[in-house]
Image (cartoon, grey):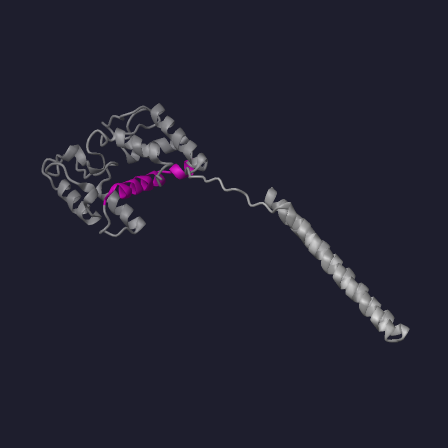
Amino acid sequence: MDKFYVYRPFLDLVGFTEGTDKGRGYNETLSYGAFTGGPVDLVSMTLNQIDQLQTKMLQHPKNKFNSSAAGRYQIVRTTRRDIQKALRLDGTLKFDKDMQDRMGCYLLGVRGIDKYLSGRLSEDTLINNLAQEWASLPTTKGKGHFDGQNAAVGVARVRSVLAEVKRRHAEGQPVETVEVEKPVMPPQVEKEVRQKTNWFTSIFGAGGIMATFGAWAAGLDHEKLLIIAAIVVFFGLGFLLLGEWIVRRVRKIRKALEE
């Protein structure tokens, strides 16, 4: 699963407009390695090593751009340092693809993409904000935000990509679904509960009648016989009602399982 699934279309757009995807992607540096002494393996370097490399780029005598853009999203040293501080990233962490994607998404968030997705920021404002982060993106006027900078794509392309981001946001991260068979309580359960309850009630009732008859045969007075009979009837009805309650509970549980 892609943890950056929602923002991936825009990350890919930046990779295209910044020109890194036609080069070495996550391993690309400003002017395709002109100020790093050739290609470098950025994804295997720590953030501390990246800092040293970007400092070296800024000190290069031919670097008239005064830029240290590195990685797929061409993040300069000052911005990367700010991100590390904000996210409390240890300098020993790698500047790998996951880290670069994370930083790219952080910049999208700083420019307001999450406010846009929640309806709290207009699309035009977001587009103009993003053009200030990446010079290769156009403002709503179709030009780059910075003087002398030409946008690599038109505004319509940016709006199309934002529409896809919005669609993915509404859809949510795709997840793997597994069909689970619902548990079902067999109808026989209710029948068996009722039968066993009635059987127990019948046994108790028969035993009670025999006990009452035995007491009568032993010559107990009528008052004691009535007490014994009342006890038998009370407990007999109690078992009967308890059985019905159990049956109803079983029926309710079975119905819930079937929904």
Look at 26% across and 41% down and name the residue there: 97
Viewer-closest of 206 and 114? 206
**Magenta span contains residue 112:** yes
Viewer-closest of 29 and 236? 236
Q: Position of residue 235 (x, y in %)?
A: 77, 64
Residue 207 placement, left or right of 142:
right
Look at 84% across and 73% down and name the residue there: 215
Residue 182 placement, left or right of 128:
right
Q: Position of residue 88 (x, y in %)?
A: 30, 52
**In the rendered image, the vertical position of residue 60 relative to residue 84, given as above or below:** above
Number of numbered tags placed on the structure image:
0
**In the rendered image, the vertical position of residue 200 relative to residue 4, given as above or below:** below
Q: Magenta span covers which residues? A: 95-116
Q: Position of residue 28 (x, y in %)?
A: 19, 36
Look at 29% across and 36% down and name the residue there: 133
**Split into 4 quadrants, where in the image is the C terminus?**
top right
Viewer-closest of 204 and 180? 204
Look at 21% across and 29% down and name the residue there: 22
Magenta stretch: dominant secondary structure: helix
Viewer-closest of 60 and 106? 106
**In the rendered image, the vertical position of residue 238 relative to residue 136, given as above or below:** below
Residue 234 placement, left or right of 111:
right
**Magenta span contains residue 34:** no
